[in-house]
Image (spheres, helix red, strand yellow):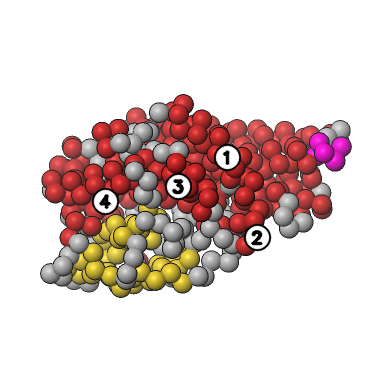
């Protein structure tokens, strides 16, 4: 898989880069990029081969996401959401399914969703809410059982790909028992309303609008077929909720270095020692962050959910987010005022890179988690705010 998917990502990245400025300026969704991803078969990246996919490992996903982000970070970020959904679904082994009490009919429904992804469908994530962020235990979107299946009602924010995805992974709390948080795969269509609210500093082409739900879905759209699995999955697979972003921002940082080098050479500024030093430090910092992401991914593949694996997961998110912002700021300063003009690649990359620390878990939350762990505490329980 690695060669096929990685070559596709490297082939597509320049196309994404050529379109990125227009989509950033207009705040428009890169529909052409997603057409390219579909034609390359990358929506099946995390889907098992038996269902028509590429059955990539987490490490292979990370490598692909980094390359896509070198073209357009916004496109890679939305793709990351789809990979998170399909990756988490595909990671439910027979042993894990049995441990979680997942019924056979839920696995059949899961395979149907994964097969659709391999055939070109893609999924967005509708988790965050105003006032709650991505903390599952604080959500207000509610669901209840009906004769037709499940009725969901509520509002989501920061739903990347809103209005364009074929389906949405929606986290909601039981109306009957608010301590129970479940996830549903809601198909696009009636009952979903997109409110265009996304006009942000960076990642402007993600169409991360608000999504309002008042919809009934069939019973088999409850992921796992068992209520209350959302918090369990968050504990078992934090890499999809935390570290999958990291690979994207390593790619953004690398793109900023590439854009700076092109600009500096074109302006005959490469002879300045201070300029070279900035690029040298940026290169070293980005390489270090990429190695941490790669190590976290390797551990996820070998021992998912392990205590030490999870430490690397949180390290990866922290370092990728802070490194991207610092690298982009430094190379922009090296390039000078002309690179701050709207439409210049470095100006866009600077804004995109600044978002890396803000995605959940934010850099401050990551650092707090790691600090508690270093002090010998339980970072999932001893923080001042609930992680999920």
Residue 277 in which image quadrant: top right
Q: Where is residue 381? Give x, y as percent.
A: 34, 54
Secondary element under disc 2, as helix, strand or loop, is: helix
Which callout, 1 or 3, points at the residue further toward the start of the chain? 1
Question: Is residue 228 found left or right of 241 in the rendered image?
Answer: left
Which callout, 2 or 4, points at the residue further toward the start of the chain? 2
Question: Is residue 57 found left or right of 149 in the rendered image?
Answer: right
Image marks 2 and 1: residues in contact by CB distance under 8 Å = no
* Residue picked out by circle 4: 232
Which callout, 3 or 2, points at the residue further toward the start of the chain? 2
* Residue picked out by circle 2: 25
How far apart in space, not on screen, are marks 2 and 4 (Cα)?
Answer: 40 Å
Residue 80, numbered circle: 3
Question: Is residue 381 found left or right of 225 in the rendered image?
Answer: right
Residue 13, numbered circle: 1
Residue 222 in which image quadrant: bottom left
Image marks 4 and 1: residues in contact by CB distance under 8 Å = no
How far apart in space, not on screen, are marks 1 and 3 (Cα)?
Answer: 15 Å
Q: Residue at x 47, y 43 (%)?
A: 37
Please say if 296 is above or below 181: above
Image marks 4 and 3: residues in contact by CB distance under 8 Å = no
Q: Residue at x 59, y 42 (%)?
A: 15
Please report the bounds of the magenta region as a residue range. Answer: 264-268
């Amino acid at each position: 898989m690695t060669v096929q998917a990685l070559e596709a990502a490297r082939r597509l990245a320049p196309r994404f880069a050529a379109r990125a400025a227009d989509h950033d300026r207009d705040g428009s969704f890169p529909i052409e990029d997603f057409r390219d991803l579909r034609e390359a078969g990358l929506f099946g990246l995390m889907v098992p081969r038996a269902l028509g996919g590429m059955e990539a490992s987490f490490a292979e996903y990370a490598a692909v996401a980094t390359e896509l982000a070198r073209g357009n970070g916004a496109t890679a970020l939305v793709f990351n959401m789809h990979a998170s959904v399909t990756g988490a679904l595909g990671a439910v082994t027979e042993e894990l399914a049995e441990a979680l009490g997942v019924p056979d009919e839920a696995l059949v429904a899961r395979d149907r969703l994964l097969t659709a992804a391999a055939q070109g469908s893609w999924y967005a994530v509708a988790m965050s809410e105003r006032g709650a962020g991505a903390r599952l235990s604080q959500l207000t979107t509610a669901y209840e059982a009906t004769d037709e299946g499940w009725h969901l009602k509520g509002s989501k924010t920061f739903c990347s790909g809103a209005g364009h995805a074929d389906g949405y992974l929606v986290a909601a709390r039981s109306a009957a028992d608010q301590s129970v948080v479940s996830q549903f795969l809601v198909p696009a269509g009636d009952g979903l309303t997109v409110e265009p609210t996304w006009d942000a500093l960076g990642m402007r082409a993600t169409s991360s609008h608000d999504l309002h739900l008042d919809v009934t879905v069939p019973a088999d759209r409850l992921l796992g077929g068992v209520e209350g699995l959302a918090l369990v999955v968050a504990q078992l697979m934090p890499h999809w909720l935390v570290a999958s972003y990291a690979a994207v921002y390593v790619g953004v940082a690398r793109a900023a270095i590439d854009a700076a080098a092109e600009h500096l050479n074109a302006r005959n500024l490469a002879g300045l020692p201070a300029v070279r030093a900035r690029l040298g430090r940026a290169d070293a910092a980005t390489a270090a962050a990429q190695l941490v992401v790669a190590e976290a991914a390797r551990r996820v593949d070998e021992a998912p959910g392990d205590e030490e694996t999870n430490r690397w997961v949180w390290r990866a998110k922290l370092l990728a987010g802070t490194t991207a912002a610092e690298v982009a700021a430094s190379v922009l300063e090296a390039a000078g005022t002309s690179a701050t003009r709207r439409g210049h690649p470095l100006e866009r990359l600077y804004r995109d890179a600044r978002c890396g620390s803000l995605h959940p878990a934010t850099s401050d939350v990551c650092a707090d988690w790691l600090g508690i762990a270093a002090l010998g505490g339980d970072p999932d329980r001893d923080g001042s705010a609930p992680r999920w």
